[in-house]
Structures are given as C-alpha cells and as structure tokens.
C-alpha cells in the first residue's frame, strides 16, 4: 500500500473533500453526530468565522492514490501567544485540529506536516487537537465512546488516542463533562442553600430577555471574560467571534434556560443552557435537504430534548472563593431544572466541559450527585 501524500488545500474542490472526509470515516460509528455541512464550511472560512480576526490556519489533506484518507489543520492564535505561559498557552504555542485519519500511518504524516508548518512559523510547542478555537471543540475524546455527544461537543475514533500518543504527545489538560439526572430534586443540603438564597433580598436570579439579545450578550461576555481570565487555556472572546456565535446560537436561545444573577443590582454570574440540538440533528446525517430543514425548523419552534447541556457558566472573580459563588450556581441550576423538565421534556443534564483541576466546579458537580460521562484530552509536544 503506497504511503499517503499530504498537501495544503487550495481550491473549492479541496474544501469539499476536506469536509466530506469526516462523513465517510465516521459513517459506521453509531454515536457520531454528523454536523451540517454548511456549518463546517463556515468554521473554516475566514469570512464567516470571527476567530480568524486574530488567528491564521492552514488546512491539509492526506491522499493515497489520489483518494482522501486524512485531514488536519495547523493554526496559530495571536491572542493565545499573548497569554501567560502558566495558563497553558503563551509565546511559541501553536495548534493543530480538525483531525481525521483512515489509519495510523496517515495520522503520523498528517501530524508531522502540521508540526512542520508550525515550526516554519516560529512555534516551539504544539497543542492538539483544538478545532479551531479553544471555545469550539477542544480535546480528543478518551472516555465516553458509548454514547453520542451533546451539542457543540466532539466525538472521535477510539483509535486516535493511541495513534497520537505514539507520536510523542502527552496530556496537557483533561476536560470533563458531567451527567446529571434532572428529574430528581437535588439533595437536601443543596435545597437548603437554594432556599437561603431565595430569602436573600440582595440576590436576584433572572431569565435573559431575548428582545435585548445584544445587551444581554454583552453582560454575559463581561462576566465570562472576568470569571475565566485566570483559567488554563483562557483566550478572551472578541467581538467578531461573539457576533458569529450569536448568529449561530440565537435559534437555540430560550429565555427560561439562560440565567443571570444580580447581587445588589450588579450582574455577577450567568449560566447558559442549550437543549441538545444533536438529538434532532443526528438522524439527518448532515443533510438539510429534502426534508431536514423543515424538521429542524419545527423542532426549534417547540423543542423537546432529553438532554440539556450547560456549556458555559461563570461567577465574577471577586466572588469565586466565597460561599456565594456555589450558592448562585446551585440557584441557577435549580431554576433551569424547573423549566427544562416540564417545558422541554428533559430528563438529564450535561455540565461541561470542566477543567480537571477546577475544584470549585467539580465540587458543585459532586454535590448535586452528577457523574463524569465523557473525558477529553488536549495533548502537547515540544517542537
């Protein structure tokens, strides 16, 4: 069997091949959720993804006898280069992602080509997979292959772990998601904490107002950039990214599933919950036509979802070491649970991802009796 040849993509036909490869390689995985092709193309299009306002990327295809057998991106985020090294990124850090490979030999030549591109750009360390932004689909799935991912989470071939580690990559950070039965009331201790918060006149937990979408998004962004600023892997979200994410996620924004906490009138915490869009998406196999678009529109008008995912939450930094932080988190989770079960038919929640050393969030997840259901690893290697 001839060795695969890796080349940079440079045409619309190449983009098509790059996108379609994932559908072929994952076709027999019952738990892979095929994304909408237009969404994938928008992610890699500098004109449609605000991340490119502070980043650059090169996409590569691997071919054997002219047939695509693998793909990878190599990319540099200028904001990540400016972050303190002790927070995971910093000077010399490059990335690769959007990784798919038919076999181990293909994986090896793809990663080597991405590494060379990063070296040529002056990078001294590679992190991957990160596809493309740390806010999109970071990490490789290493636990939880037996069920489908929720909205905005990745799912990967179990063989990839061994292939990547064989290339000299070691874990830089582990990301966790937690599974939670939301049909049951929380333990008595949590209920008492919530009740105490409800009696506190200084605390107000409110739903977002979708008619003031931009204003509410700005409030959440301000809390997020403050709350996460010391976290491993943090890169501030920019306005172009917020604009693009807003367009993408606005159809999934339901007022009773997103909460903002105010303390003495000041917004200090938020929690975003999304009904699992992957549930209606999975049967479509990435195709909107002929009837997929109508099915999705009907679902979005009155969504019913077994699972609710909490992709983001944050409490301002000045409160993070206080009991108030966990109290606000419990209150938001409970208020969303009260809406999710009767209004959307939800039975389970998924919280994450959560950094494996985020003791505050892990303690909250443990207290409400959730359990780890998926683990992702971001790998690193010196160049």
Image (cartoon, rainbow, N blue to C red):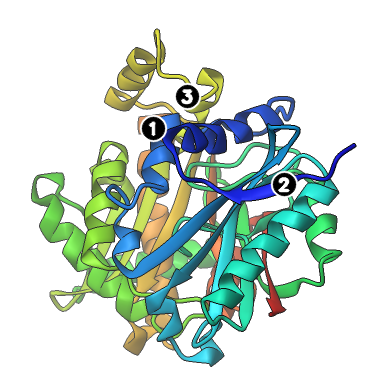
Percent x, y for residue 344? 39, 31
Task: Write down the residue under mark 3.
Answer: 280
Percent x, y for residue 74? 55, 62
Task: Write down the residue under mark 2.
Answer: 5
Look at the image and tell me in which quarter the C terminus lies.
Answer: bottom right
Q: Earlier in the sequence, mark 1 or mark 2?
A: 2
Residue 313 in sight in this render:
yes
Between residue 39 and residue 207, name the one nearer to us: 39
User: Which residue is located at x 53 percent, y 44 percent?
Assistant: 182
Percent x, y for residue 141? 69, 53
In screen coordinates, is 264 left or right of 84? left
In screen coordinates, is 2 left or right of 61? right
Question: What is the crowding at mark 1: few (fewer than 14 residues within 10 Å), some, or many (at least 20)?
Answer: few
In this picture, is 56 found above or below 37?
below
Question: What is the crowding at mark 2: few (fewer than 14 residues within 10 Å), some, or many (at least 20)?
Answer: some
Task: Write down the residue under mark 1.
Answer: 38
Residue 367 in sight in this render:
no
Q: Nearer the viewer, mark 3 or mark 1?
A: 1
């Amino acid at each position: 069997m001839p060795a695969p040849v890796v080349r940079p993509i440079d045409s619309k036909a190449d983009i098509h091949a790059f996108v379609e490869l994932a559908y072929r390689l994952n076709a027999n995985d019952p738990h892979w959720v095929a994304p909408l092709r237009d969404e994938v193309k928008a992610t890699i299009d500098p004109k449609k993804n605000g991340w490119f306002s502070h980043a650059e990327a090169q996409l590569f295809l691997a071919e054997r006898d002219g047939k695509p057998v693998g793909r990878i991106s190599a990319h540099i985020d200028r904001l990540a280069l400016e972050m303190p090294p002790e927070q995971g990124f910093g000077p010399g850090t490059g990335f690769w992602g959007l990784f798919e490979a038919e076999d181990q030999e293909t994986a090896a030549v793809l990663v080597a080509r991405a590494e060379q591109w990063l070296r040529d750009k002056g990078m001294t360390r590679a992190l991957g997979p990160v596809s493309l932004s740390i806010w999109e689909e970071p990490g490789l799935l290493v636990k939880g292959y037996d069920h489908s991912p929720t909205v905005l989470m990745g799912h990967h071939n179990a063989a990839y772990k061994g292939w990547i580690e064989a290339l000299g990559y070691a874990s830089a950070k582990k990301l966790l998601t937690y599974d939670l039965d939301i049909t049951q009331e929380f333990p008595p201790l949590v209920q008492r904490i919530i009740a105490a918060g409800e009696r506190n006149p200084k605390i107000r937990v409110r739903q977002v107002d979708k008619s003031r979408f931009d204003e509410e998004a700005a409030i959440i962004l301000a809390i997020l950039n403050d709350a996460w600023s010391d976290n491993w892997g943090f890169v501030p979200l920019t306005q172009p990214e917020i604009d693009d994410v807003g367009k993408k996620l606005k159809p999934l924004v339901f007022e009773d599933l997103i909460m903002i906490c105010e303390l003495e009138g000041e917004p200090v915490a938020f929690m975003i919950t999304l009904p699992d869009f992957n549930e209606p998406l999975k049967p479509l196999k990435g195709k909107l036509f002929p009837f997929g678009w109508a099915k999705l529109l009907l679902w979005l008008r009155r969504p019913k979802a077994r699972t609710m995912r909490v992709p983001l939450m944050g409490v301002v930094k000045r409160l993070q070491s206080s009991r108030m932080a966990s109290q606000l988190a419990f209150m938001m989770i409970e208020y969303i649970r009260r809406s999710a079960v009767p209004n959307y038919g939800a039975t389970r929640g998924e919280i994450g991802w959560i950094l494996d050393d985020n003791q505050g969030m892990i303690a909250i997840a443990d207290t409400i009796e959730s359990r780890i259901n998926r683990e992702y690893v971001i790998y690193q290697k010196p160049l």
